[in-house]
């Protein structure tokens, strides 16, 4: 007899390794000079939300660009799926050409994506990314349809059928998706699943830090991803090690990335560190944190030791910053094979 | 007193180096295996026209992709503008997101583009490009709005005000743009301008070879670009040198590209040859011929010797095949500077 997604045995062997809720965004990327960043008044290295008018004005000031699907959690899933994980995505596109592009790219990566496109305005989200010669990306996001993901669009059987629910902090900002994510957390926890969360950006913490601290206090977050700036913003501690010491006891697994300084994880009292993987040339740092999370979560899904999870994250991050775009291009499975071989042997 | 575009002095110092009429296409590019090409029944290395239904089916079979503006003549202009030439483009997009992308990218490259977007269906043209590990591109083009460029959309003052009118053979296939191009040729010639033509693909010659031979016989084409397959198709001579010998006396300047074997030009009885410029890795051959034409026409516009024109073409072609996409990414001016230095000195 075929099993439905809700039979106990399906719950014991969940259909998905990771289901994520995130922004459904197409990145519009172009090279820019440091002078351009200053002239346009952009916050270099940051992510700034812009309205449709600002997006049009910035686009007009941008050089010839290329369009590549993005979105933080969606990028993470693209990495996970490329590594061989079974993934599902929940996010809101509009019924338009960029929505078709986003949906195509995520499905073509082997990721389940069933959220219906939204009719009418606003258009599918886009992120205008200026990439400076140092590889740094400066992002300006028009959230468009993405911020209207309705809570009732969630398929709770899908969330209950994923070993890990992965949530993107960026999407905590708009109200409707925040409600959807709160409901998803409740569903995942009721089904005995793990909840992973990425803090995304310091501005999100400045607006919603109290929410995040409350979730952590309530034990709702099993795996937390942050970079060192976000760690400082969340804990109020400028010193990296003090921040780790303050937060780690509250989170079963804490992962903090530090760009070229590597990454640090604490899980059940065990500490592990990894250096950044070498890169011939940093072309575009867009997606570095997203792909680090992909590698880490893949190791986690396969029961790898903490240090191996970090190593997988570092390899995936190094791949994605070596080219334009936040989705992996090289064969990630082949890149991580040496690190996984001991586990398989 | 300000000069209008039609005053004699404007004609003596035309506003544009090159104005081109071509398809307004966004390329949708993804890596593919040779097995994919066979399984999907595609003609490897060729350009096949597909209808909207076929385009949807092929897109569904394609891996995660990236979108980069394309179109043969538009790519040539992108190269010319990057080199410092003054350019204008005439082509038809629809009023949709991909039309916005195309228009943005061409204008952001510094190219004049004033053809109004077309309302309603069909959508902006797209070319689904499968790139195999050998760098070969297999193109499947849905012409969409591009084929409805109306003859009355031509701004004849713009054409009269360009030293060279450049036409794309691909666009000879649909009826309305063909009429537009015939009118543009008449306008350019009446204004004493040169007409350059690229044959684009053997299938175009198999359908319209008689038209092209008639234009050549009538002395309407000043500069003709072909690859060796197109030369054979047009002349009926399989031997390269026989083909050159047959065609060269009929064309003031004939340029024939031969992929990794370099290129050959004949102008006013003078022959010149160039080897292909070295490339560390051929990533994607899309746009090789288009960028060769860009380099050649730039040299022509600056009065460079025939061999230098070929060398400029080879450098630009080598740049574009070293990365994904048919628009230049590196600083073409810097790449060609050593070749141009003797002219400036």
Image (tube, coloured by chain):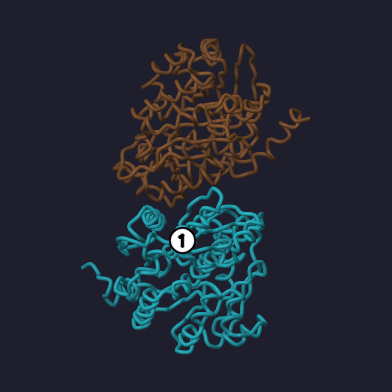
Chain colours: A cyan, B brown
- Chain at tag 1: A
Residue A272 visible in the displayed image:
yes
Picture residue at 54% right of the left edge, 73% below the top: A201
Task: Work out whether A85 lies above or below A190.
Answer: above
Task: Work out whether A336 lies above or below B217.
Answer: below
Locate residue B181, reporting x and y percent.
42, 26
Locate residue A154, reporting x and y percent.
32, 72
Front residue (pair A83, A258) = A258
Looking at the rendering, which quadrant does residue B183 occupy?
top left
Front residue (pair A26, B150) = B150
Mark 1 lies on residue: A53
- Is A51 left or right of A45, judged from the image as shown? left
Residue B275 visible in the displayed image:
no
Mark 1 residue crowding within 10 angstroms, few (<14) / some (14–19) / many (20+)? few
Q: Could you tell me which secondary element the residue under label 1 belongs to?
A: helix
Task: Work out whether A69 lies above or below B312.
Answer: below
């Amino acid at each position: 007899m075929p099993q439905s997604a809700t039979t106990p045995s399906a719950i014991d062997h969940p259909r998905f390794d990771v289901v994520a809720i995130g922004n459904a965004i197409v990145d519009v990327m172009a090279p820019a000079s440091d002078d351009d960043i200053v002239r346009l008044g952009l916050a270099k290295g940051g992510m700034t939300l812009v309205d449709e008018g600002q997006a049009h004005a910035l686009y007009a000031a941008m050089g010839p660009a290329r369009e590549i699907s993005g979105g933080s959690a969606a990028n993470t899933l693209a990495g996970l799926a490329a590594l061989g994980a079974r993934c599902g995505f929940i996010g809101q596109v509009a019924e338009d050409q960029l929505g078709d592009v986003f949906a195509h790219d995520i499905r073509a990566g082997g990721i389940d994506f069933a959220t219906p496109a939204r009719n009418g305005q606003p258009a599918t989200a886009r992120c205008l990314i200026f990439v400076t010669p140092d590889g740094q990306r400066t992002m300006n996001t028009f959230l468009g349809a993405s911020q209207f993901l309705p809570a009732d669009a969630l398929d709770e059987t899908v969330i209950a059928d994923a070993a890990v629910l992965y949530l993107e902090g960026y999407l905590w900002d708009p109200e409707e998706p925040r409600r959807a994510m709160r409901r998803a957390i409740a569903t995942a926890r009721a089904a005995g699943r793990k909840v992973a969360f990425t803090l995304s950006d310091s501005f999100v913490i400045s607006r919603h830090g109290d929410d995040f601290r409350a979730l952590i206090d309530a034990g709702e977050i099993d795996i937390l991803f942050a970079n060192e700036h976000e760690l400082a913003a969340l804990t109020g501690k400028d010193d990296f090690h003090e921040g780790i010491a303050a937060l780690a006891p509250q989170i079963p697994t804490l992962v903090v990335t530090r760009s070229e300084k590597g990454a640090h994880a604490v899980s059940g009292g065990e500490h592990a560190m990894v250096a950044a993987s070498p890169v011939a040339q940093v072309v575009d740092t867009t997606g570095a944190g997203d792909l680090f999370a992909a590698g880490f979560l893949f190791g986690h899904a396969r029961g790898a030791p903490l240090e191996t999870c970090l190593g997988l994250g570092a390899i995936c991050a190094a791949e994605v910053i070596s080219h334009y775009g936040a989705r992996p291009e090289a064969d990630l499975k082949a890149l991580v094979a040496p690190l996984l071989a001991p586990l398989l042997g």
